[in-house]
Image (tube, helix red, strand yellow):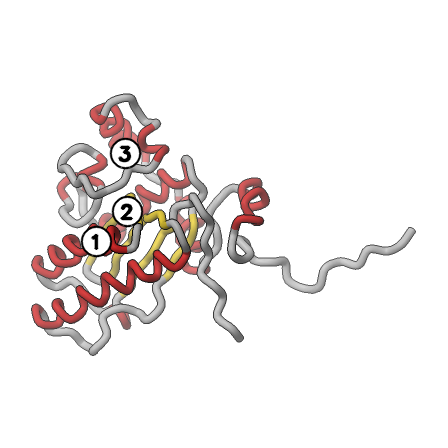
Amino acid sequence: MARQARLFIPECPMLIELQGIARQEVFKTRESYFLFHALLPQSAAQERVLIHSYCMVPTRVLLLISAKEAACAGRFVQNLNRHFSPAVRQMQAVQSSALWEPRFKSTVVQPGSHSLKASLFVEQLAMRVTGAPDLTTYPWSSFAAHAGAVNEAWLTDLPVYWQLGNTPFERQSRYRQFSEQGLSELDTAGLSRCLQKGWLWAEDSFCVEIQELANRPVRPRPRGRPALKRAL
């Protein structure tokens, strides 16, 4: 069976997951974290990719990006791997010659409130995996930048983030409040499921509206053959 094309919809953010092969730890030292962090804006600039949110934990990385073309996302990940993998092997012992699973997972997210939730979903990976109690002090995610604790000028704010307030202080404060509310179990489970399966995370009405712009079906088709229409 032919591999299904990676879902891409113009003007919609894309959520990407890089997973250590066989769930091995990719980041074992602070130097490896620093290296990957430094490569993010470099690779993004080379492939005309905008990075909205990121989070690194020992075994994986989540990224929320926007790209002009479907191929840009793939080349962005390839650039990261090409520069990161050889260098990190020299820094630390790895269990295999490959660092990442050969095919990264991805999904597309509806702009607006869904994308803001996806941004927080990315950043809360640190809480889900490492149990980090305070995302503001976790050094390997974009939350501190969105909350106003650090400045990372290479990040591109989502349009919905700008709508949180008229000044940086207002936006940062309201994003912190948004994070304190957290994501519902339904949102977390739905986004996780779409990321694993590669389906669009969006409202049903948006799925219908956007289908013509997508490069493939955005949701799984119903099983079985279509019902026959009987002549009257």
Q: Earlier in the sequence, mark 3 or mark 2?
A: 2
Closer to the chain start, of discs 2 and 1, is 1
Q: Percent from the top left, x then y, of residue 106?
A: 39, 57
Identify residue type, mark 1. Leu
Q: As rendered, which of 192 and 156 lies closer to the eye? A: 156
Disc 3 residue type? Glu
The residue beneath circle 2 is 51
Q: First in sequence, mark 3 or 1: give its number.
A: 1
Determine whether label 2 and label 1 are within 8 Å by CB: yes
Q: Is residue 55 above or below residue 77?
A: above
Q: Secondary structure beneath disc 1?
A: helix
Q: Which mark is residue 150?
A: none
Q: Residues within 10 Å of mark 1 (few under 14, many from 20)?
A: many
Q: What secondary structure is marked by label 3?
A: helix
Residue where numbered disc 1 is placed: 40
* Distance of label 3 from label 2 (alpha carbons): 23 Å
- Label 3 close to label 2 by CB (< 8 Å): no
Which amino acid does the dot numbered 2 rest on?
Answer: Ile
Q: Position of residue 111 (x, y in %)?
A: 43, 39
